Image (cartoon, rainbow, N blue to C red):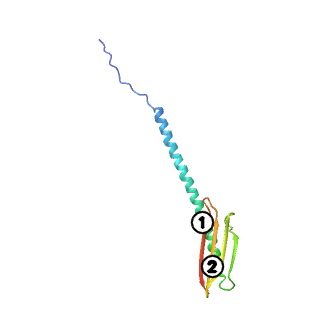
Amino acid sequence: MFSHVPRARTRPPGFTLIECLVAIILVNVGIVALMTATTFGARAVLASRQRAAASRTALNRVDWLLARGCSGAASSGDTAAAFAPNAAERWSVTDPAPGIREVQDSVSYVGADPAHAVVIRARTLC
């Protein structure tokens, strides 16, 4: 007599629908994380460039005003900074004490974040 022994069920090769959906969700989470990191990185680079340009503008003005020496009266001025259309520069030259000349320059700009300002002060003996 032949006895029939049941075989264990075997799965066909491949992935189940649930495994595929979980893999797709994990890949999407990774892609969104990379896109977010790239956006924050780009904002940081832009803010750094604007801050560097404002610092260069202020340093150039202070150097130019100090190079004039102590001749001339104290003065001040406002100009539009050239590095960005929404930037403004304000500078002043004062004599806080006899024989001392103080130069101050501030550059304010609106970037990706709220408004920022770079202020540079220098003193020289006359």
Q: Nearer the viewer, residue 120 or 9?
A: 120
The x, y position of residue 57, in whole percent, is: 64, 71
Relative height, residue 5 to residue 45 (above, below): above
Do the residues under discs 2 and 1 have CB atoms within 8 angstroms?
A: no
The residue depicted at 35 percent of the width and 24 percent of the height is 8
Q: Is residue 86 left or right of residue 48?
A: right
47 and 75: which one is in front? 75
Residue bearing the label numbered 1: 51
Quadrant into which the N terminus falls = top left
| Rendering coords of residue 37 (x, y %) | 53, 53
Left or right of 85 in this view: 43:
left
Name, please, the residue furthest toward the left: 1
The quadrant of the rendering that contains the C terminus is: bottom right
Q: x and y percent of residue 5 in the render?
A: 32, 19
The residue identified by callout 2 is 103
First reached walking from the N terminus: tag 2 or tag 1:
1
- SS at mark 1? helix
Farthest residue, direction front: 96
| Residue in the picture at 34% in, 20% down | 6
At horizontal 59% and vertical 61% (from top left) the residue drawn is: 47
Residue depicted at x 48% and y 32%: 17
Image quarter for residue 94? bottom right
Q: Amino acid at mark 1?
A: Arg
- Callout 2, which amino acid? Val
> Which image quadrant for residue 46?
bottom right
> Horizontal and vertical percent for residue 20?
48, 35
Query: Does 58 sit above or below residue 21?
Result: below
Horizontal side, residue 27 vs residue 79: left or right: left
Instruction: State the CA–CA distance, disc 2 to disc 1.
Output: 20 Å
Q: Secondary structure at mark 2?
A: strand
